[in-house]
Amino acid sequence: MKKSFVWFASIVAFAPLLFLVLSNSANVLCWDQWDYYNVFFQHRGFWAIFDYQHGHHRMGLGGLIMWITNTVTGWDMEMLSLVTVIGIFQIALFLLWITRRINGKVAFADACVAIATLTLTQLDTALANNSLAQVVVPSLLMLIYAITWSTPSSVVKTLSLAALQFVMLFSGYGITFFPVTVMLIVGSIWRPNKLMPYEPANFLLLTSAVSSMVYFYGLVDCFTPYLRFEPMAIARYLFKFGAMFSGIDGVAGDVVGAAFISALAFICARSAWRFYRREKNDSVQFFVSACALAYICDSAIGRTAVASRYMTITAIGFASIYIASKQNLAVGLIVAVLALNGSVTTWQTRSTNSVILTTQRCQNFIDCYKVTGDALACNASYVVYPNPKATHMEKKLEFLKQNGLGFFR
């Protein structure tokens, strides 16, 4: 009964998100895609795609999934949005699995995990500035790492964790999760109650070092220019994650955001203490919550982009708070209410939602270009990239046209 209820709640929560993504996606590159698709325009190979740098991260597994999607669908951006939203649904399923593994049972309140993860505030992740490679794939890899970590010790487990460390480091913002994996490994051999034998732990630390050397070889520093150390600006940005998730503006939104960050930080500290001293399940709790907090802090210090693009990480953070509460019904209700309020707000304002308006402009750009063939003029009316000449938009559209890709299919 409880499992059926949680499954039903997951499907019900997923349906509106899937509907909005399918009904609003546009089959044209949008904003940052014009830049990080350079690697596909250049017909680069398997490793070149995996190693391709965009911003301060690399494309990794997300880039390869995009390459496969491009190959199968003929560069159909609508299909890429579908793949992304399916990835978000898989994140919800992984979080539900982790909830059961940590708490040992299924509860009705577990539905809040799916409701939080599948909130409509995820729209920006799947639509206007698709974050499959940047956010969704790294989050999936992080959760798979947590699930693998919780399995009994074996050679296969150790090799799988080593491979996941490498792939996660190279995949989008998985770089912010990587230091937490090192802390997890070091903590697992902490006396007096070590959770991992020295041999596999040392092997994982060695492979972490090798992975880091490969990753940083040839990396261009695109992070430092964004760094900012203004305490008030950082605090307001940190609060913004919780505020956008809940759909609450103003002072009330800041309160929600502050409570979210404080609760997540407390859970990280508490689970770290318990993990270092006693329980294996607390190591999983620490890893998931610390990865969410690490990414949010990294974004606040080193980014100026809108937080809506990173709602996947925020959702994982809210789910982690519920998991740490040992399936407390009151905490589950609070998480569900905040997530539902964000979804309802997004649904009610969909006619003026900035993400949906952006995808509408993308569709208008397609219609304009089909009639005029003038990319610069169409972009001036319906902006799909702020500086079309810098990204060589005309040449890229000509490439798509000659090869019958995208909206030219």
Image: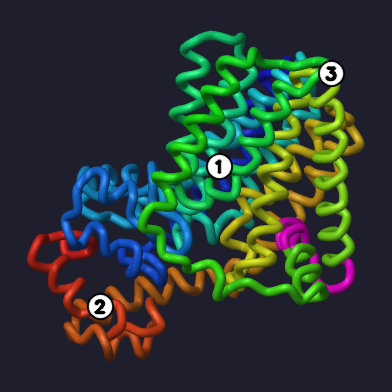
Q: Is residue 353 visible?
A: no
Q: Secondary structure at mark 3?
A: loop
Nearer the observer, disc 3 or disc 2?
A: 3
Name the side, left or right, on which 159 lies relative to 179.
left
- Mark 3–mark 2 distance (CA, rounded to whole Å): 56 Å
Residue 139: numbered disc: 1
Percent of width and height locating residue 49: 28, 50
Q: CA distance from mark 3 to mark 1?
A: 27 Å
Question: Which portion, as a residue range, is magenta?
Answer: 241-252
**Viewer-side label of 3, 1:** 3
Q: Is residue 172 above or below residue 279?
A: below
Closer to us: 244 or 221: 221
**Disc 2 residue crowd, few under 14, some 14–19, many 20+, Cα 10 Å:** many
Label 3: few (<14), some (14–19) or many (≥20) C-alpha neighbours in 10 Å: some
Q: Amino acid type of disc 3?
A: Arg
Q: Secondary structure at mark 1?
A: helix
Of residue 7 and residue 178, the one placed in the foreground of this image is 178
Judging by the rendered image, the residue that carries numbered circle 3 is 278
Q: Where does the image place residue 297, in percent across and percent down from the top left? A: 70, 58
Q: In the figure, 119 relative to 379: above or below?
A: above
Residue on which disc 2 sits:
393
| Three-letter code for the amino acid on which mark 2 is drawn | Met
Q: Residue at x 64, y 49 (%)?
A: 313
Residue shown at 81% from the left, 54% from the top: 261
Is the C-beta separation of discs 3 and 1 under 8 Å?
no
Residue 165's place in the image compared with 53, above or below, is above
Give the secondary structure at mark 2. helix
